[in-house]
């Protein structure tokens, strides 16, 4: 019985990965121009959020060092 409980989440993870593979094809070759524009905007948005998070981390570390002194 415990073995079945351990393997249950693994089955769910495999299904989610399969769903992600299906969604990636939409991002690779969008069917319409509207979807292509949305994908391009989403890529720019995620890059901007990543840069913002890195900037906030650096500023936070600088403030932490200043307050520690």
Image (cartoon, rainbow, N blue to C red):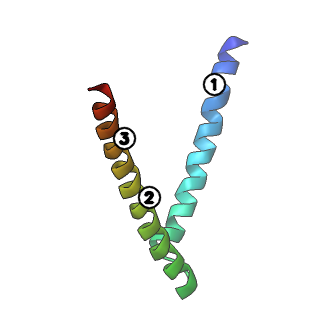
At 54% from the left and 70% from the top, the residue drawn is 26
Marks 1,2: beta carbons within 8 A: no
At 34% from the left and 33% from the top, the residue drawn is 64
Q: Quadrant of the C terminus?
A: top left
Q: In the depicted view, which residue is nearer to us: 47 or 67? A: 67
In the displayed structure, 4 sits above or below 55; it is above
Between discs 1 and 3, the one toward the N terminus: 1
Q: Which mark is residue 7?
A: 1
Q: In the depicted view, which residue is nearer to us: 5 or 37? A: 37
Between discs 1 and 2, the one toward the N terminus: 1
State which mark lies toward you, 1 or 2.
Answer: 2
Between discs 3 and 2, the one toward the N terminus: 2
Q: In the depicted view, which residue is nearer to us: 55 or 41? A: 55
Number of marks present in the image shown: 3
For residue 14, which quarter of the picture? top right
Question: Dot 1: what SS?
Answer: helix
In the displayed structure, 17 sits above or below 30; it is above
Which residue lies under the disc numbered 3? 60
Using the rendered image of the protein, determine whether residue 32 is visible from the camera's viewpoint. no
Q: CA gap, disc 1 to disc 2?
A: 36 Å
Is the residue marked by circle 3 packed among few (<14), some (14-19), or many (20+) residues within 10 Å? few
Q: Is residue 61 left or right of residue 30?
A: left
Q: Which mark is residue 49?
A: 2
At 44% from the left and 68% from the top, the residue drawn is 43
Relative image position of residue 54 (x, y in whole percent)? 35, 49
Q: Quadrant of the N terminus?
A: top right
Q: CA gap, disc 1 to disc 3?
A: 41 Å
């Amino acid at each position: 019985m415990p073995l079945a409980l351990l393997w249950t989440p693994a089955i769910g993870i495999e299904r989610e990965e399969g769903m992600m593979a299906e969604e990636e094809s939409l991002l690779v070759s969008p069917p319409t121009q509207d979807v292509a524009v949305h994908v391009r905007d989403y890529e720019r948005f995620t890059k901007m959020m990543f840069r913002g998070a890195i900037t906030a981390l650096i500023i936070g570390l600088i403030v932490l060092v200043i307050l520690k002194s």
